[in-house]
Image (cartoon, rainbow, N blue to C red):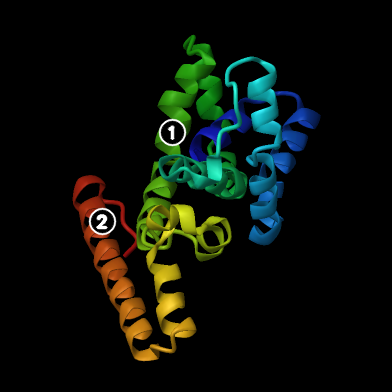
Amino acid sequence: MPIILALMINELRNGWFKRTFQTVSYMPHFISWVIAANIIITVLSSSGVINNILMGLGIINEPIQFMQNGPLFWWIIAFSNTWKSMGFNAIMYLAAISAINPELYEVARVDGASRFKQMLHITLPSIKPTIIILAILAVGGILNAGFDQQYLLQNNTVLQYSEVIDTYTYKYGLQKGMFSYGAAVGLFKSVVAFILVLSVNTMAKKMDEQSLF
């Protein structure tokens, strides 16, 4: 999603609209999860905006319990995480795009390449090294499902859907005083993340000769 957003912003030609759109897109990153979680819970409540709109359009007859539905909770987590981090993560891709030689686009336009083909054959290949490096780093945090997000949005109804390693470690390690057990779980997660980074880095190096180290 950050890559798609960066490509969209790069294609905007109106300078004022481009800057405004970019600013609005990364503003959620600076909102704490405490505030963001309350906004999400309020919007998705029985009397929230989403249910009011759906009922007003006649799509549903009674409010949907979004925060009490396990499978829906996964979608809520995915959407909220994307909404909050997408704009800020796109900045790195925009920085890589800005470093592309403008002459490449001029030559492509002379050859009759459309803006879509320029994006496909110039922009994406040029930022490929950045995409690979950031993908490798992202794999290292794949087990970090977001403690703040999960802990603030979860409830007893969806606990079996919302429990992740970080919240599990917190509950057993700190709340129940099992410090050694919590430390072991945290260490295990770090070891798995390290192995994943090494594996993906090796694969990237063999496939594309581009790696983190």
Which marked residue is nearer to the observer: mark 2 or mark 1?
Answer: 2
Task: Decide which of tag 2 and tag 1 comes sooner along the chain.
Answer: 1
Q: Which disc number belongs to residue 29?
A: none
Q: Residue furthest right?
A: 16
Residue 42 position, x and y percent, is 69, 45
Residue 182 position, x and y percent, is 37, 82
Classify residue 196 by image quadrant. bottom left
Q: Nearer the viewer, residue 104 or 166?
A: 166
- The answer to whether one can see residue 166 in this image is yes
On screen, residue 93 versus residue 127, left or right, reads right
Look at the numbered disc 1 and give the secondary structure of its residue: helix
Q: Nearer the viewer, residue 71 or 165?
A: 71
Tell me which residue sits at (61%, 25%) in the image. 11
Q: Nearer the viewer, residue 34 or 15?
A: 34
Residue 119 position, x and y percent, is 48, 25
Look at the numbered disc 2 and give the secondary structure of its residue: helix
Tell me which residue sits at (26%, 51%) in the image. 204
The residue under label 2 is 200
- The answer to whether one can see residue 93 in this image is no
Classify residue 125 by image quadrant. top left
In which quadrant is the C terminus drawn?
bottom left
User: What's the amino acid at mark 2?
Assistant: Val
For the image shown, how many numbered marks are present on the structure? Answer: 2
Tell me which residue sits at (38%, 88%) in the image. 178
Classify residue 37 by image quadrant. bottom right
Label 2 crowding class (10 Å Cα cut-off): few <14, some 14-19, many 20+?
some
Work out whether 37 lies above or below 53: below
User: What's the amino acid at mark 1?
Assistant: Leu
Q: Nearer the viewer, residue 35 or 67?
A: 67
The residue under label 1 is 124
Residue 21 position, x and y percent, is 72, 34
Tell me which residue sits at (24%, 67%) in the image. 195
